Image: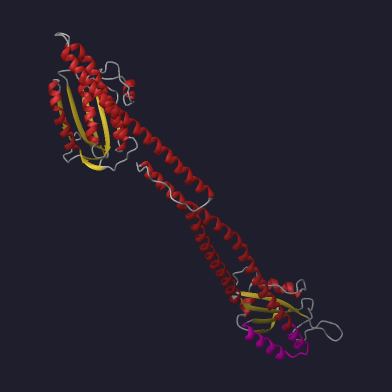
Amino acid sequence: MRRRLLAGFLAFALAVIVLLELPLGISLANNARTNALSEIENDSASLALLVGASLQRHDRADARSIMERFSKDDHAIVAVIANSRLELSSGAGVQEELADAATRSILRSAATGKVEGEEGSNDPDDDLLYVAIPVSLQAPGGVTTSSKVASAEADIGVVMLVTEPAAPLHAQINRDRLELAVFGAAMLAVAAAIGTMLAVSLTRPLARIEAALAAFGAGHLGTRVGPTRGPAELRVLRTTVNEMADRITELLSTQRAFVADASHQLRAPMTALRLRLENLAGALEPGHEEDALPVIAEIDRLSRLVDGLLELARSDGKRPGRVALDVDEVVKERADAWGALADERHVALHFNLGASGQHKPLVALACPGHLDQILDNLLANALDATPPGGKVSIAAGAHNGHVDIHVVDSGRGMTASDRARAFDRFWRSEGAPRDGTGLGLAIVAQLVRISGGTAWLDPAPEGGIDAVVRLEAR
């Protein structure tokens, strides 16, 4: 967000600088060119008067001397043309300049009196600046003459061509452009500094709020957003976030306290009730002892329900850090732990590691102790669903950066709609064991989610259920 704000601010500043400096640069270049031509025209007009006076006195030597001094001082080329013929010149390169089509056009315009003075070209890349000035030679009677300079074709007249190098003009234009570029770069740097300060002032409070929310979501319920500088809207957002965190913390604390207290308070009377029922069962007449067994089984189921609620309450809102776990070792350990119950129920319990054909140890990321509880719940459900003579298998393998663990039973299976609802709390399918609580898969889903994985149920090839747990591989 900070980069986008800064990029937008710099783009706007750059557009403003370009829109202001581009016309200004063009205007400065035009003004410099106009001033340079005006200076040449003024000097040429004065030179034309002096040369014209010398020619009127028939003093060509004086006129040439004046032209040479002017050429030397201003590094210019000066030529006097009469009747399209070069009469007097000073400076190098006269013939080349007279051969130029633009120069001849200017001379014709100046000689016929249509213009008083005109630069030779409007191209700013010209190497020379041209000025053509008509030279009037008035005889005492008011008749135009040029002696040797002017002939009978006096209607064309006498023209003075003055050419000066354009290098100083180009240097001035380049200096102006460079100054504008430096000024624009400085303004852009200032805009970048201001934009950075504005972006930081806006994004730093948001980053603090984001960090606090991330910590709160990871289970650190005491995290709050500290004092924040910035616009009033961000301060209001900080207050709102802290108030929300306070309410959520209070709700979670109340929920966990209620479940923990209820579980603790219920466990003691249920234990006492079970003991009384067992004592009563022992006092019953012979042959009636089994009448108390269903009641004792319900008490046991209620105890497991209370324990499941307590486990869910402990897991809600907790986000312990994940660690690398040896999946092979955990699977072997839990399979050994449940082997005795499987033998008692005449169910074959098998485990197969490295289902993908790899020989490396399977290592997954999970919260400490979660994978053990997940497998315990899945194996308990699988053994409950598998009839005597059936089998339960555990398989684990790596696949596309994940570790998949399968617990497959050979029971009667579930429909697609039942598999979709199986992870809901307290939900039990038709035909499920009566002593079930409907919390086993809910606990599995909660623990898998906290460990950053996913869990689902697939139909097994032999008609049972394939419970799949997918965790991120290290």
Residue 231 position, x and y percent, is 53, 51
| 165 shown above or below 346 | below
Given residues 395 and 212, the one toward you in this image is: 212
Closer-to-camera residue (304/89): 304
Image check: 314 left or right of 145?
left
Name the chief secondary structure element in magenta: helix
Mark yes or no: residue 455 visible: no
Residue drawn at 61 percent across, 61 percent down: 20
Residue 72 is inside the magenta segment: yes
Q: Which residues are magenta?
A: 47-75
Q: Quadrant of the C terminus?
A: top left
User: Residue 393 versus residue 72: which sits nearer the camera?
Assistant: 393
Q: Which residue is pictured at 65% across the width and 72% down the height?
A: 33
Q: Position of residue 406 (x, y in %)?
A: 23, 30
Give me the residue at 43% from left, 38% from top: 247
Q: In x, y percent, where is residue 266?
A: 29, 26
Say which residue appears at 34% left-offset and 24% top-offset.
420
Residue 327 visible in the picture? yes
Q: Name the image quarter holding residue 299.
A: top left
Count of all numbered marks drawn on residues in the image? 0
Above or below residue 347? Residue 292 is above
11, 215: nearer the viewer: 215
Query: Which color scheme does this rendered protein use?
Result: secondary structure
Residue 116: percent from left, percent from top? 75, 74
Q: Is residue 312 magenta?
A: no
Residue 75 sits in quarter: bottom right
Q: Quadrant of residue 59?
A: bottom right
